[in-house]
């Protein structure tokens, strides 16, 4: 590996402190020297086998995507420009309580079906792993960017208990504890939950607390997608704070939004709740994406009882007319727990992707628009999609509030996460644009955060949550996972109309001192590896 000196960069080092001009020398995958302009004035400037003129560019640590859904994409797509071109050098996988390890053959088939909308069917993947450690070993064969992994609590429950809505027996709870401990011992960074997704949502707080005690013993953190982002959002946040504190476990709140009409303007109430806990020495961080719409699967809107038993049972209920009518009533009149306790508004539910090409005409339209065009009820349209697409349809849910987005991103425990679903014809633009959108729109155009603050949110703070001792800062001895971007032009290229356009203003990205993006183009370098939790 050749030595490199990045010449005359404006270094924003991840600490939040003002930038400085420096030459940065990289060798052996690490930063070996930082020579500030003042220090260089009276001495010979560093030389290397290769020099990169960074005049006018900011050099920062690589960005950490604290909430990613690239669990299969990293294996399927060696290019992975969706993240690499944004300056992302590390993604955290295993999110929302559902992923592909630990599993047995039965559970793997069930999970693949349940989250096909997030990650595709996986028919093009060789699932040659079953444990967390084996999945991390698979990543170590070479991937586009680095990846950490959270043990998914829903998958653990499916493996130990099944997909039934019932309490775990003592033996089943012991089994879950062992699975979580094994995953953490094999290198997972913590535990995730999806408490509006089955089967994770069937776990009572006492069960989650026991699993979090295991996480705390191993020095990990708990990352819940909690029980409501809608009608019961504040109560759900408070529930997670209390649970984590009882377990003595660090807490990271996933995509910490305040959505739906009931929460317009209520972000300060969330932050007051967190500030009170932080003042009492709670260990809490959160992540958000810088957009208002959410994104998930259409099947996620269903009431929990409709999904009990797994994907096959859900499809059977949807094909039964009487049960389908009961589901419609819960969605449109009662307020489904899958839709966060609010009644569904079909004109906010836009189909972003389907697995069956015959359904392509639905993509880019709301359920209401497609229903109107066919002269049928929205539920008739939604039901057809759910059954015909085998629960694989993905959606955008236009229910967010800009003032909440800006308020939450200012908080000092905030980090960035894309929650990027890469499947579908028209995925959410956050999958391709989250990090440049922070830098271009919210820093340069709106001034919601200073450049130095924003970089700290996207680098050092998540690295600290992940307990990475040598990442997240531009510092001598640290790994050379670095981004060079133009603060005057950096911007997300992706839009809702054209969501797969790559960003502008990010000419160079290095992982382990190797260029994965060079002069704005993806190289063939696969420098990413699994990043395992540091032992206590």
Image (tube, rainbow, N blue to C red):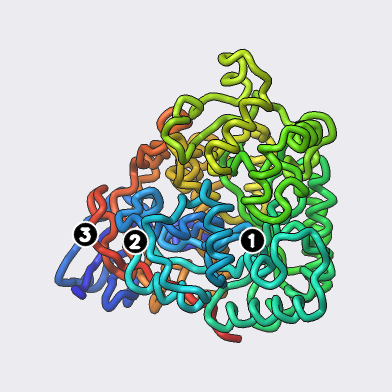
Quadrant of the image occupied by residue 89: bottom left
Of the pair 190 and 347, the residue shown nearer to us: 347
| 81 to 503, vertically: above or below | below
Q: Which mark is residue 532?
A: none
Asked if the residue at tag 2 contacts the one at tag 1, i.e. Cβ–Cβ closer than 8 Å, the answer is: no
In the displayed structure, does residue 274 sit left or right of residue 33?
right
Residue lying at 27% horizontally and 66% vertically, measured from the top left: 514
Q: Which residue position holds label 3?
A: 52
Instruction: Check residue 97 in the rendering and tell me which mark sits there, or answer none.
Output: 1
Is tag 1's residue or tag 2's residue first in the polypeptide sequence?
1
Q: Which residue is mark 2?
A: 144
Other residues around mark 2 within 10 Å, as few (<14) / some (14–19) / many (≥20): many
| Nearest to viewer (mark 2 / mark 3) | 2
- Quadrant of the frame with the N terminus: bottom left
Residue 3: which quarter of the image? bottom left
Q: Which label lies toward us, 1 or 2? A: 1
């Amino acid at each position: 590996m050749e030595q490199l000196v990045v010449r005359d960069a404006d270094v924003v080092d991840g600490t939040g402190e003002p930038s400085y001009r420096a030459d940065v020398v990289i060798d052996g995958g690490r930063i070996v020297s930082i020579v500030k302009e003042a220090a260089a004035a009276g001495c010979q400037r560093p030389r290397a086998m290769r020099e990169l003129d960074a005049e006018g560019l900011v050099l920062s640590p690589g960005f950490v995507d604290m909430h990613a859904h690239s669990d299969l994409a990293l294996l399927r797509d060696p290019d992975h420009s969706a993240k690499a071109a944004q300056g992302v050098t590390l993604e955290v996988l295993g999110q929302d309580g559902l992923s592909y390890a630990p599993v047995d053959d039965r559970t793997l088939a069930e999970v693949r079906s349940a989250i096909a909308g997030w990650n595709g069917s996986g028919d093009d993947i060789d699932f040659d792993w079953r444990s967390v450690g084996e999945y991390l070993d698979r990543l170590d064969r070479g991937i586009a960017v680095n990846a950490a992994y959270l043990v998914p609590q829903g998958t653990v429950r499916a493996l130990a208990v099944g997909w039934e809505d019932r309490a775990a027996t003592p033996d089943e709870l012991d089994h879950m504890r062992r699975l979580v401990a094994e995953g953490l011992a094999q290198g997972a960074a913590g535990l995730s939950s999806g408490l509006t997704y089955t089967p994770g949502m069937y776990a009572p707080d006492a069960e989650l607390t026991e699993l979090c005690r295991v996480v705390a013993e191993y020095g990990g953190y708990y990352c819940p997608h909690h029980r409501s982002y809608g009608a019961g959002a504040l109560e759900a946040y408070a529930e997670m704070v209390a649970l984590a504190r009882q377990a003595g476990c660090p807490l990271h709140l996933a995509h910490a939004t305040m959505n739906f009409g009931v929460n317009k303007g209520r972000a300060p109430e969330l932050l007051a709740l967190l500030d009170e806990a932080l003042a009492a020495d709670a260990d809490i961080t959160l992540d958000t994406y810088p957009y208002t719409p959410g994104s998930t699967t259409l099947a996620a809107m269903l009431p929990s009882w409709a999904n009990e038993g797994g994907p096959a049972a859900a499809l059977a209920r949807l094909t039964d007319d009487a049960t389908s009518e009961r589901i419609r009533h819960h969605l449109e009149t009662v307020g489904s727990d899958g839709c966060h306790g609010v009644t569904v508004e079909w004109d906010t539910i836009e189909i972003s992707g389907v697995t069956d090409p015959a359904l392509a005409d639905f993509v880019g339209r709301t359920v209401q628009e497609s229903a109107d065009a066919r002269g049928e009820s929205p539920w008739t349209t939604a039901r057809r999609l759910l059954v015909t697409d085998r629960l694989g349809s993905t959606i955008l849910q236009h229910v967010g509030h800009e003032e909440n987005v800006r308020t939450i991103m200012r908080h000092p425990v905030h980090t960035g996460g894309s929650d990027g679903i890469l499947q579908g014809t028209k995925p959410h633009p956050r999958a391709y644009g989250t990090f440049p959108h922070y830098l271009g729109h919210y820093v340069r155009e709106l001034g919601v955060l200073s450049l130095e603050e924003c970089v700290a949110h996207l680098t050092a703070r998540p690295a600290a949550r992940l307990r990475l001792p040598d990442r997240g800062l531009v510092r001598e001895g640290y790994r050379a996972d670095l981004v060079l971007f133009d603060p005057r032009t950096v911007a997300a290229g992706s839009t809702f109309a054209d969501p797969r356009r790559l960003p502008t203003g990010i000419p160079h990205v290095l992982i382990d001192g190797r260029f994965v993006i060079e002069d704005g183009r993806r190289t063939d370098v696969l420098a990413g590896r699994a990043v395992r939790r540091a032992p206590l």
